């Protein structure tokens, strides 16, 4: 019994010292990481982790507009390859929208059509659209306006050359490290720290901005801070009034914030919603920024978003991923665990997949995991039956 008491006392002192070290070294965010992710058996963020964080609510549309069902709604079974992929990679929602009608939908693992799950980096496409909306409404002068006009921490040296457009196209030149599974990376810190602005303002320059694409979630986070400064509106409020409500969203949603005290959205990720409400934004861009006859976003901004800025990086535009397959050009929203809204405008097709993980293997292009090609191939095989 004495041994057990001594052991518990030792462990108590050890944990206490560890916590002190974490605070002294400014890595106390790891306490939250352990509590919300690692102790729950995960090695990275997971689909319903929004329940573990502070969130801001975004209201459903005052005039919700349900997707109509296609005349061939759910008349075709998933292909064997798709069924296997959905099982193997933990799909929770797979939806095919053809000619603005739900052609196929299926949900798994206890999730339904209205179930919330984390968007992860699909949120980046929304933030880029909000940037263009802010330009359209005169809050931001142009893509070429310096970030320094809004964020004083980026007014020295190479940082002074950084533009708003550089952030949207992932060309900031900062030293952001996109490492999801390292507990000490800035990506992990940003996910768990309760003062996200402080984390972002500590970034340093690595290369000259505006010269090349480098995927960095920090660019989108900085862009959100720019938009909030320019509009004098919280990003979640601007999102609600600019896109969520005007697009007839049927469900309210949540956007994670760093903490109640600082109330800055995790703009590079973390909108909790469902497949068919996510799909609305794909339809908006498919239709050149128009929704039910109203021009929500200028068509020139839509066109710019879904074309590559850098010829050396044809896979990315302004907030959207670009993909060529079957002789067709697709653009997509893309999230960490295989969250996708995939759009083919000429065929009037939108494919949405949400799930617990993406395929572990890369495709032949070395940019996209294999699952993206499979979800497209199998959707078209089903459509062509």
Image (tube, rainbow, N blue to C red):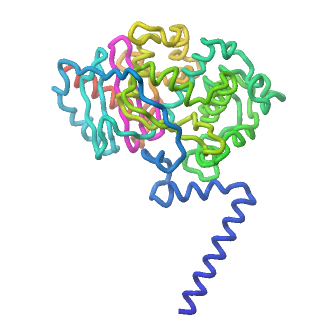
**Residue 143 shown left or right of residue 376 in the figure:** right
Q: Tell me residue 378's x, y (percent).
A: 27, 28
Q: Tell me residue 102's x, y (percent).
A: 27, 23
- Residue 266 picture quarter: top right
Q: Please check the rendered image and state whether residue 354 is part of the magenta-colored stretch, yes or no.
A: yes
Number of marks? 0
What residue is shown at x 48% (from left), y 21% (from top)?
243
Q: Tell me residue 43's x, y (percent).
A: 49, 53
* Quadrant of the frame with the C terminus: top left
In front: 151, or 313?
Answer: 151
User: Magenta residues, as a range?
Assistant: 334-357
Which residue ends up furthest to the bottom in the rendered image?
2
Q: Please check the rendered image and state whether residue 187 is part of the magenta-colored stretch, yes or no.
A: no
**Residue 347 shown left or right of residue 321 in the figure:** left
- The vertical placement of 302 against 156, above or below, is above
- The vertical placement of 282 against 198, above or below, is above
Which residue ends up furthest to the left in the rendered image?
75
In front: 342, or 266?
Answer: 266
- The vertical placement of 384 against 272, above or below, is above
Is residue 297 at all visible to an observer of this figure? yes
Which residue ends up furthest to the front in the rendered image?
62
**Residue 102 shown left or right of residue 30 in the figure:** left
Is residue 366 at all visible to an observer of this figure? no
What residue is shown at x 44% (from left), y 8% (from top)?
294
- Residue 195 picture quarter: top right
Q: Main secondary structure of the magenta part?
A: strand
Q: Tell me residue 6's x, y (percent).
A: 60, 86
What residue is shown at x 61% (from left), y 43% (from top)?
258
What residue is shown at x 70% (from left), y 15% (from top)?
144
- Residue 354 picture quarter: top left
């Amino acid at each position: 019994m004495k041994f057990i008491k001594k052991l518990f006392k030792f462990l108590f002192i050890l944990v206490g010292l560890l916590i002190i070290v974490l605070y002294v070294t400014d890595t106390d965010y790891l306490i939250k990481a352990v509590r919300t992710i690692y102790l729950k058996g995960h090695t990275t963020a997971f689909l319903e982790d929004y329940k573990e964080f502070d969130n801001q609510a975004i209201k459903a549309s005052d005039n919700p507009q349900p997707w109509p069902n296609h005349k061939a709604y759910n008349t075709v079974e998933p292909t064997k390859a798709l069924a296997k992929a959905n099982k193997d990679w933990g799909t929770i929602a797979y939806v095919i929208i053809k000619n603005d009608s739900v052609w196929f939908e299926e949900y798994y693992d206890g999730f339904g059509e209205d179930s919330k799950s984390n968007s992860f980096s699909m949120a980046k496409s929304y933030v880029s659209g909000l940037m263009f909306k802010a330009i359209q409404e005169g809050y931001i002068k142009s893509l070429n306006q310096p970030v320094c006009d809004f964020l004083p921490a980026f007014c020295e040296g190479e940082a002074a050359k950084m533009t708003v457009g550089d952030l949207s196209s992932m060309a900031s030149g900062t030293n952001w490290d996109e490492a999801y599974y390292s507990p000490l990376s800035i990506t992990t810190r940003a996910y768990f720290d309760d003062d996200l602005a402080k984390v972002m303002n500590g970034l340093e320059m690595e290369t000259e901005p505006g010269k090349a694409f480098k995927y960095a979630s920090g660019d989108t986070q900085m862009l959100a801070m720019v938009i909030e400064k320019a509009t004098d509106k919280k990003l979640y409020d601007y999102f609600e009034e600019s896109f969520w409500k005007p697009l007839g969203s049927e469900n309210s949603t949540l956007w994670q914030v760093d903490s109640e005290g600082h109330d800055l959205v995790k703009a590079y990720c973390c909108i909790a919603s469902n497949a068919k409400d996510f799909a609305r934004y794909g339809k908006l861009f498919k239709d050149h920024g128009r929704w039910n006859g109203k021009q929500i976003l200028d068509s020139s901004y839509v066109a710019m978003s879904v074309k590559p800025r850098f010829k050396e990086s044809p896979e990315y535009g302004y907030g959207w991923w670009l993909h060529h397959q079957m002789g067709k050009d697709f653009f997509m929203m893309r999230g960490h665990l295989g969250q996708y809204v995939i759009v083919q405008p000429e065929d009037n097709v939108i494919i949405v997949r949400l799930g617990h993980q993406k395929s572990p293997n890369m495709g032949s292009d070395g940019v996209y995991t294999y699952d993206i090609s499979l979800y497209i191939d199998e959707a078209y095989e089903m459509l062509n039956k």
